[in-house]
Image: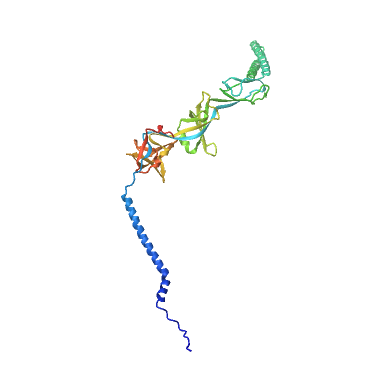
Amino acid sequence: MAEKSNAPRPESGRSGPARFFIRNLPRLLVAVLLLVIVLLALLMGEEKKRLQRERENTPAPERPPVNVVVLTMHPTTIRDLIRLPAEMEAWEELVVSARVAGTIDMVRVREGERVDKGALLARIEEGDFRIARDRARAAFDFAAAEHERAKTMFGDGVISVAELEAAGTSLRTAGADLDNSELQLSRCAITAPLTGVVKKMFAKPGLFVGIGDPVAEIVRIDRLKAVVGIPESDVTAVTGIDEVGLTIKALGSLRVMGRKHFLAPAPEDRAHLYRLELEVDNTAGKILPGMFARAEIVRQTVTDALVLPLHAVISEQGRHLVYLDIDGTAQRREVEPGFLEGWKVLVKSGLHPGDRVLVEGQRSVENGRPIHVLRELGGLDEIRP
């Protein structure tokens, strides 16, 4: 029997290329995929160029004009104001005290009543003081008679000069005692030391009061003091003023003027506020002590100024811009703002008289945008803030 050979059989002619193809199939797929991607990119680039050419050749649609309101610039006046709180105080406030001791037997006025200077407020019982006055008068009459007798006797040479002088001294002493008794009697009537309003009445009938005990408190309100705390930074501005406008909200925003009366030379508290007192006429008596007011102190007044409403100025990256109406289009311009007066702002540079500034609709436009003017304003008084 023939032995079987263990040698490998030779591969057939077809098995070699097939095996090569199978081994390199992933590489072929990647190459085909890259080729497809390149072709797509080229096609997309061409399409993009075509669309760009179409956009460039297509005319842009016209934008509709924006409706706006414009303000024609005219020189006007603007003030740099300090607005500070103020409190009304009585011009004078006095406590009337008893000057003699005794029992109150009559009270003539009530709290809140207006009294004139010298008017009777209350009275202390006068009986003991009348008795003392009568005793002093009797002593004075006796001393006067003795002095006359001494003068006669001295003329006759009966008494010496010393005895005559002693009689004169007794007369003068008795006269002083009489004057003192009459003064004490007059002090039983407690009167108003000034014209004002009775803020407090301490005296009551039957109440015993000693010397110095309070009887009534009277405030003068025909003139008032408006007291304002001035910050240290504004003291210099206040030094040169004479009058300050005041608004009292409790009286329907009543406007009054206060004249400078006193400025403290040093601050009164840790807040470093300097006390400014303003004299306010209150002849009508409408203003009451304790009412609050708003003081408007003018630091600076600029005439022939160009002024805009604050909302017309647009702040953008540290710049201040406005839009002007120039031949029916919005044109942007940079301005330099100054101080404020309420809702108005001073324009230091960037504008000229006659410029037409957009005050409404300016935030809906951009440079060169067509605009349609709905209304033209000739002054700030036509703007409602």
Residue furthest to the bottom: 1
Residue 3 percent across, percent down from the top left? 48, 88
- The answer to whether 140 is drawn above or below residue 286 in the figure is above
- The answer to whether 194 is drawn above or below residue 151 in the figure is below
Residue 268 picture quarter: top right
Seen from the viewer's position, the closer of residues 385 and 181 is: 385
Residue 320 picture quarter: top left
Residue 105 picture quarter: top right
Asked if residue 245 shows in the view, the reply is: yes
Residue 256 percent across, percent down from the top left? 48, 28
Which part of the image, by quadrant, shows the C terminus?
top left
Identify the image's colour scheme: rainbow, by chain, secondary structure or one colour. rainbow
Seen from the viewer's position, the closer of residues 76 and 114 is: 76
Residue furthest to the left: 57
Residue 81 percent across, percent down from the top left? 45, 35
Question: In this image, 242 relative to 213: left or right?
Answer: left
Asked if residue 162 shows in the view, the reply is: no
Question: In this image, 289 relative to 333: left or right?
Answer: right
- The answer to whether 111 is drawn above or below residue 14 in the figure is above
Q: How many marks?
A: 0
Residue 168 percent across, percent down from the top left? 64, 16
Question: In this image, 384 relative to 141: left or right?
Answer: left
What's the residue at 39%, 66% (across, down)? 32
Seen from the viewer's position, the closer of residues 267 and 106 is: 106
Seen from the viewer's position, the closer of residues 334 and 11 is: 11
